[in-house]
Amino acid sequence: MRCPTHWQHAIGRIIESPGTVMVAGEGDVGKTAFCLFLANAGAQAGLKVAVVDADVGQSHIGPPAAIGMGIMEKPFPELSAVPAEALYFIGSHSPAGHFSRMGVGVAKMVARARGKKLSLIVVDSCGLVKGKFAWRLARGMMEMVGPDRMVLLTRTVNLESLTQLCHEQEDLTCHQLKSAPGIRRKSTARRRKLREQAWANYLRGAAQLNLTMDSLALEGIAPGEERANWSGQIVGLHDGQGECLGLGLVSSLDWPASRLELLTPVEERQKVKRVIFGMQRMKIHAHSPR
């Protein structure tokens, strides 16, 4: 799609005075497309650019169920082509019930980008904009991140509550824009299919990783907990400093043998010190052991 003229005008103003930009709006209004246009414009202008992908259900940078941060030193055809520089594990395909982790995760990814002295940091948020939970999530993110600009994209939903939040923040410039014409709404089935494809892309080339649970810190699970089926449980693998090395899916869990078998692209078995169990499962397919 081409960048709409009214988007081009806003992007031009942002590029003149870059900083941290949060992009919010209902689903299917073109948030990811706007972020791509903005980030590419920044890269073309010679700016150092980072994109923080906080849409954990429809992730483009990194796998679903995680917040991803990528650095763009050149324009990219799509955000899914941007390599993930860092990940923050959420463990769910929805921000609901995970507002604190979402806020902390976005803030950490933005802080990492700021630490690299990047000129333009674009935050692609989720499509949750209605209700008190959406208000809490937006307020928490704004307080933790401290953006310089807020872009509100809308098609039909009244974003008055988010607009009011913007007005409450000092030194925050708010851009209220209409969505791009021609963007089609995605059905629930279509979103599920895209999420499955994102997982398939992330796990391409993955292998089975066998871990000894005695040597790991386990979170999100009780010792000895039994479930009917562990297969496909989403987990986040972390090192001793708490950095997310990557995500994986449980293949099997054997408490008596203290054995945890995962399907993951993470290869550094010795670096894995903590495994956080998420809230959801995905289908897995057979892969060779590592």
Image (tube, rainbow, N blue to C red):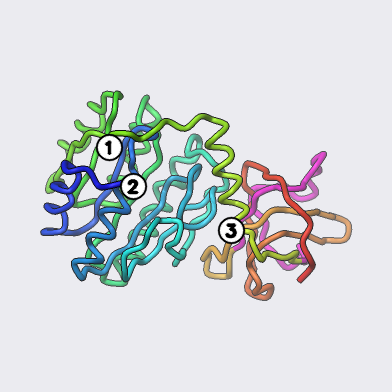
Q: Residue at x 22, y 44 (%)?
A: 150
* Dot label at residue 180: 1
Q: Is residue 277 left or right of residue 143?
A: right
Picture disc at residue 202: 3
Hey, what amino acid is under mark 2? Ala
- Residue 211 falls inside the magenta stretch: yes
Stretch of the chain drawn in magenta: 210-237
Q: CA distance from mark 1 to mark 3?
A: 29 Å
Q: Earlier in the sequence, mark 1 or mark 2?
A: 2
Circle 3 crowding by C-alpha within 10 Å: few under 14, some 14–19, many from 20: some
Q: CA distance from mark 3 to mark 2?
A: 21 Å
Mark 2 — residue? 33
Q: Residues within 10 Å of mark 1 (few under 14, many from 20)?
A: many
Percent of width and height locating residue 215: 73, 68
Helix, strand, or loop for circle 2? helix
Number of disc labels: 3
Residue occupying image coordinates x 59% and y 58%: 202
**Which numbered mark, 1 or 3, is in the foreground of this view?**
1
Q: Nearer the viewer, mark 3 or mark 2?
A: 2
